[in-house]
Image (cartoon, helix red, strand yellow):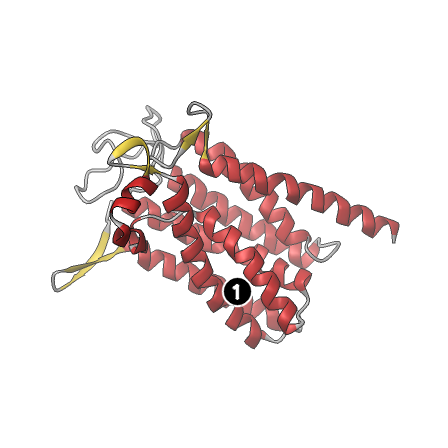
């Protein structure tokens, strides 16, 4: 693929980060536009977006550091390498895990909205529709970088990575384009959550919880097709992200059922 979009002198500009920033911008624009339509003041929400951008990157890096495997020594937690070389842990451009950012953003948003006395359910629903849009662009970035790649496949849509800077392995062999699978899944979730928000929302929080449940379920399944070193547990049965996905899916479904029952009883 194209790990670097272009060169500035001797420095390559990573395609991954360009697309991640486009994803952040698209999600923020969606929040701004929809908040105005919903009668919410967009200004404090834009402040929240900036806070969440930082939390997303920090949390994603923390999960990478704490839970993933060392690609240079498969089976060995990458944390050991960072303990030996602490400075490498700060290099956020070479290892992020979505769920880490997601989990750190939750308490940050909850606290901020409480301090600003903004309706949590309404705002979380805005982000429940916006986050999948960011996932779409972010996974396109992963595809160009070669990270988060899939297992070898004989299917006609398998993708062979050949660029020596690509993070995919092995090079030259058709792999499941798991990055594109998740990008398309994210795009489908965006339109589904947007539709639910505008036409089928029954109670505050429904859109965000629906996103959390659907994404975690889809991510759990997609992980079985991935082959990158991302941390495996229970004898290689489940990845770190699958364990977190279960931890997100179960509370989200329980909360959806409880809120819907409360709505019906009201």
34 vs 233, nearest the viewer? 233
Residue 76 vs 14, above or below: the answer is above
* Residue 168 image position (x, y, % from top left): 27, 38
Residue lying farthest to the right in this orientation: 265
Quadrant of the drawing holding the N terminus: top left
| Image coords of residue 151 (percent x, y) | 34, 29
Label 1 secondary element: helix
Q: Residue at x 33, y 48 (%)?
A: 95
Residue drawn at the location 50% of the way across and 66% of the way down: 49
Depth check, front residue: 13 or 180: 13
Check the image and report above or below for 143 versus 107.
Answer: above
Classed neighbour count for the residue bearing mark 1: other residues with Cα under 10 Å, few (<14), some (14–19), many (≥20) = some
Give the quadrant of the C terminus.
bottom right
In the image, what residue occupies the spot 57% across and 62% down? 109
Is 209 placed left or right of 163 in the picture? right
Residue on which disc 1 sits? 30
Task: Return the x and y of residue 74 as percentages of the image width and height.
Answer: 29, 31
Residue 210 appears at what percent x and percent y? 63, 47
Residue 132 showing in the rendered view = no
At 24% from the left edge and 49% from the top edge, which residue is drawn?
Answer: 3
Where 176 falls versus 252 (above or below)? above
Q: Is residue 266 above or below residue 74?
A: below
């Amino acid at each position: 693929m194209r790990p670097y979009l272009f060169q500035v002198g001797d420095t390559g500009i990573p395609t991954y980060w360009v697309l991640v920033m486009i994803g952040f911008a698209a999600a923020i624009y969606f929040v701004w536009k929809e908040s105005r339509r919903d009668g919410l003041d967009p200004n404090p929400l834009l402040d929240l977006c900036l806070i969440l951008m930082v939390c997303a990157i920090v949390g994603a890096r923390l999960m990478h550091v704490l839970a993933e495997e060392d690609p240079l020594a498969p089976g060995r937690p990458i944390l050991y390498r960072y303990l030996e070389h602490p400075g490498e842990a700060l290099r956020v451009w070479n290892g992020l895990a979505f769920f880490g950012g997601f989990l750190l953003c939750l308490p940050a948003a909850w606290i901020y909205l409480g301090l600003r006395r903004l309706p949590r359910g309404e705002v979380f629903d805005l982000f429940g529709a916006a986050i999948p849009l960011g996932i779409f662009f972010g996974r396109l970035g992963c595809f160009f970088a070669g990270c988060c790649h899939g297992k070898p496949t004989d299917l006609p849509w398998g993708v062979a990575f050949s660029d020596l800077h690509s993070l995919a392995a092995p090079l030259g062999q058709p792999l499941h384009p798991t990055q594109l699978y998740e990008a398309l899944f994210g795009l489908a979730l965006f339109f589904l959550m947007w539709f639910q928000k505008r036409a089928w929302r029954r109670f505050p929080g429904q859109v965000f919880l629906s996103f959390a449940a659907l994404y975690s379920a889809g991510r759990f399944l997609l992980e079985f097709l991935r082959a990158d070193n991302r941390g495996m547990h229970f004898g290689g049965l489940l990845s770190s992200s699958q364990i977190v996905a279960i931890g997100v899916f179960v509370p989200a479904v329980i909360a959806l059922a409880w809120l819907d029952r409360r709505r019906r009883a009201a």
